[in-house]
Amino acid sequence: MNPLPPIFKDWFDRRGWDVHPHQQAMLDQATDRALMLIAPTGGGKTLGGFLPSLIELADGAHAGLHTLYVSPLKALAADIKRNLRTPVDDMGLPIRIEDRTGDTSYTQKRRQRADPPHILLTTPESLALLLSYEDAPRIFSGLQRIIVDEIHALAESKRGDQLMLALSRLQTLAPNLRRVGLSATVEDPQAIANQLACHPDPCTIINADPGPDPDIAMLLTAEKPPWSGGGAKYAIPAVLEQVKQHNTTLIFHNTRAQAEIFFHNLWLANTDDLPIGIHHGSLSREQREKVEAAMVAGQLRAIVCTGSLDLGIDWGNVDLVIQVGAPKNVKRLVQRIGRANHRYNAPSKALLVPANRFEVVECVAALEAAKAHELDGDPKGPGPRDVLCQHILITACAGSFDESVLYAEIKTVGAYQGLSRAAFDDCLDFCATGGYALRAYDKWKRLLQTPDGMWQLRDPRASQRIRMNIGTIQDTDTLKVRLKGNFKPLGEVEEAFAATLTQGDTFLIGGQVVRYENLKEMTVEVSRRADKAPKIATFMGTKFANSTQLSQRILRMFAQPDWPTLPAHTSEWLNLQRKFSKLPEANRILVESFPHDGRHHICVYGFAGRNAMQTLGMLLTQRMEEKGLHPLGFVATDYATLIWGLDPVNDPAPLFEATNIRADFETWLSGNAVMKKTFRGAATIAGLIERNLPQARKSGRQATFSSDILYETLTKYDPDHLMLRITREEALRGLVDFGRIEEMLSRTAGRIDHVVLNRVTPLSLPMFLERGRIGVAGAGQDRILEEEAARLMQAAGVQSL
Amino acid sequence: MNGYYFSFCGTNCVAMPSGALYLPDNSLLCVSDLHLGKSERIARRSGRMLPPYEVQQTLQKLDDDLTMTTPESVVCLGDSFDDLDAAAQLGDDMRLWLAGMQAGRNWVWIEGNHDPGPIELGGTHRREMRIGSLTLRHIATDASAEVSGHYHPKHRLAGRSRPAFLYDKDRMIMPAYGAYTGGLASNAPVLRALFGTSPIAVMTGHKAIPVPTGNG
């Protein structure tokens, strides 16, 4: 056992602290090449990660960069800097600590490259950018440790893949580099450990005491939850009451739009003027920082927030977490609950607020899963190749490279250990020539091979554009929003949303109702307006699909004869469904047919999660279109797809024929909007589409044409192109989620229950109120478009000029 | 064909779903803003390597339209090439294809702002030309009975934005025909200023659909 050096021991003693067993274990294993600590929030995880660095740096002998700390959030880097300062200043240690993120000033960044601090706190993107500079070898040559915080969150996304690729580069620049990962509780620690370690090194996993089980319940309200929607407005009085009873409450929402609406309604009801703030990723930095500062100062009683507060920033006094809307995923729920009560060994307190009737069922299922310690998660696929392409370009920015050396280096990344040489060559070829079957760009290659076999940028000036587009976060295009005549932005809205606004429309941003005035140089100008009900800002936010495990738990609940754990209003609803139709079963697909509002409807209960149910909607409507049933549109939720059309579906079984669905899927896939969206993401990461251009973005015709055209051209003339292969693989896993349709098909094996009724069923009722209806672009829709145009022509009296 | 038949300044017109304008009485097909060679120009100037199939895509569309309408005359209404270098870089197979389409036809290249000079390809070059009552030129002036291109108009209806013809009783502005071309919304001030009244938009796509643009 490595005892604490006296100066550290004294500091712990002065604070009345003991070293936690897991912190001691981190010290004892400090020389391991890869080390992962799994600890709940508040378990002194960060200190455990940094202690070995502080001890190694205490004698002031190390010159230059010693420890790199990477976290998924800029705010986390700033927060850690503050927290580290305390022990370092108290003990008078000669350690320089700085952060470096997208928010760091240009001069500060330049200085950091010339004279790096001992400990640098940064994000995956800022690290990738640092590695793209020619002086990267000098900056990192003395690096000893890298600490990856919240590695469980990073590991789920391409940001994690980018980071691990950066680590392989760092390991070459600093061969003695030791890797440390800090993680919240996860379902498969070994999988993350394998990503962290330099393949094939082993990774030591240290498990901290998980602490007592959380105190978690559903919030009881006098009023019943509504049939649909995500606002949870009905729960506002009960939530306010809870806020009053606690010091500080975090109120989590699944989407930014929901957070905005809830915050707005909360303030309308907040007659005591309790200080309550809002925090989400679409707000301007100034606004977020203001809220964070007020939170740290203990001035706020509650914060309405989204995933932007998901990760381990230490807000100190939080003693209650409220989750509004079903958590969709048990692991995220458990991690969010961990945000309350940052005192080790005190139970966290959390309340779930279902936003609608079906979410009551989901919340109860999630509660039970959390109590049973049943975490969910899907195994991650191999390292994505679009991220690899970007990594190759970043490497080229830093200087010339040898392809075999780079390939060997990439193979040390856990997620890319299985990467074949051919697959690597494809990516390199894409970066160099565009990778087209038609070799059109011999003259304008991006990368050239010099006579000695080394690769380099044809035009070194290209590095500027590559650096400007580093990163894997897929923001939809957003526009800044500001008050007319005011320079400071209020926040951002999506371009697609802005396009739907006409003068006079009102929407919510930062908790204010504002009125759209005009669009000026790609900024949405608004005025304050409190008197009108807002048209809702549709910040997309991520719509999470219900996890497979949670869906199965819900289906098991449906099989119960009664539901003592459900509130009466919800169990009565399920009983009505059982009486008039039937409840969906795990190994069968329930299809209900009924007329409504002059249209024929079918509701398909597949329980495959939102994305897969959406895909199923597209496949089924395509099939119906072929059969001349004139489907007009559909809407999908986590559990069902509702389709409406001009003709009834008398025999749904053939629609679900597995071989047909697979065949349709192939033809459908290439022309589909989700594919186009996925393509846009992959092509942007791989450097085919540039999001940021050297000059300010221009408006109007000069703006680049839609990436959809690129997608269509490639599909037609170069269907085997790398970007299309990447797109396809990704769509299957992600937004298309065909894997879960397959799971549904094999689970139900053609057992279809068709129930024909003369009116809407209880369980399908919420589907009618669901947003996000999708029109079928078939014969039916064309006819409607034409009819609409003809009607307008008629009304305008301009059939002829 | 799914075209929209209408009369413009006394001339019978068909707005084709592809974005071409067909004048049946004159046996003339007019296309605007082909921007051939755009991907090559982008690679040359910025290092971005977009799918290099845009010439193929555009010529295929033109070939299909020629097959369908068999016109005696073809007018390319300016900005046919993204710049003169792009014209020079055109591959031999594409030149041959173009030459095949030109064979036996009266082919006119109207000058545009992207390709002002003469091009080493068949056909005649004009600043503008007259067909019956109509004047064809690249950029709109305030003359009447005029057909022009240049602005790449698009129109949005029922959530869909498509390249569109805009016309009123005095002028018509054609959509861009090239595969890699962006567009300008039909309600953009610069377009609005060109029309005395709200023009009619003919949206392209599977079928040419006319719709009034209203005052929005």
Image (cartoon, helix red, strand yellow):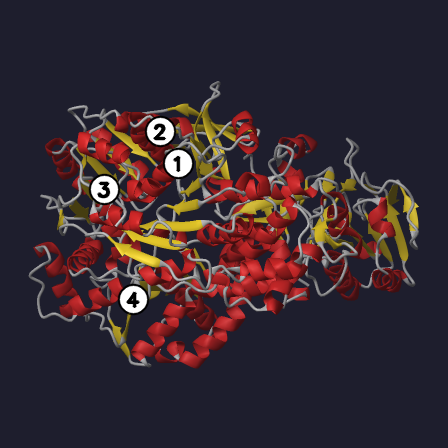
Q: CA distance from mark 2 to mark 3?
A: 24 Å
Q: Compare residues A64 and A427 and report the one nearer the observer.
A: A64
| The one of B146 and A718 positioned closer to us in this rendering | A718
Instruction: Name the N-terminal-most of marks 4 and 3.
Output: 3
- The residue indicated by pointer 3 is A42
x and y percentages locating residue A380 in the rendered image: 41, 63
* Residue A259 vertical placement versus A389 (above, below): above
Question: How many neighbours does mark 4 have within 10 angstroms: few (below 14), some (14-19), or many (20 or more)?
Answer: many
* 4 or 1: mark nearer the eye: 1
- Front position among marks 3 and 1: 1
Q: Chain ID for label 2?
A: A
Residue bearing mark 4: A607
Is residue B200 visible to the viewer in this orientation of the structure?
Answer: no
- Residue named by callout 2: A93
What amino acid type is highlighted by mark number 1?
Leu
The mark found on residue B27 in the picture is none
Mark yes or no: residue A178 visible: yes
Front-most of residues A434 and A763: A434
Q: Position of residue A766 (x, y in %)?
A: 25, 56
The label number, if any, that marks residue A57 in the structure image: 1
Check chain identity for marks 2 and 1: say if they share one.
yes
The percent coordinates of residue A396 (x first, y second) are: 65, 49
Mark 3 vs 1, N-terminal side? 3
Q: CA distance from mark 4 to mark 3?
A: 36 Å
Mark 2 residue type: Leu
Chain of the residue where label 3 is placed in the rendered structure: A
Q: Residue at x 45, y 64 (%)?
A: A200
Measured Cα–Cα span from mark 4 to mark 1: 54 Å
Is label 3 in a helix, a strand or a loop?
loop
Chain letter of mark 4 equals: A
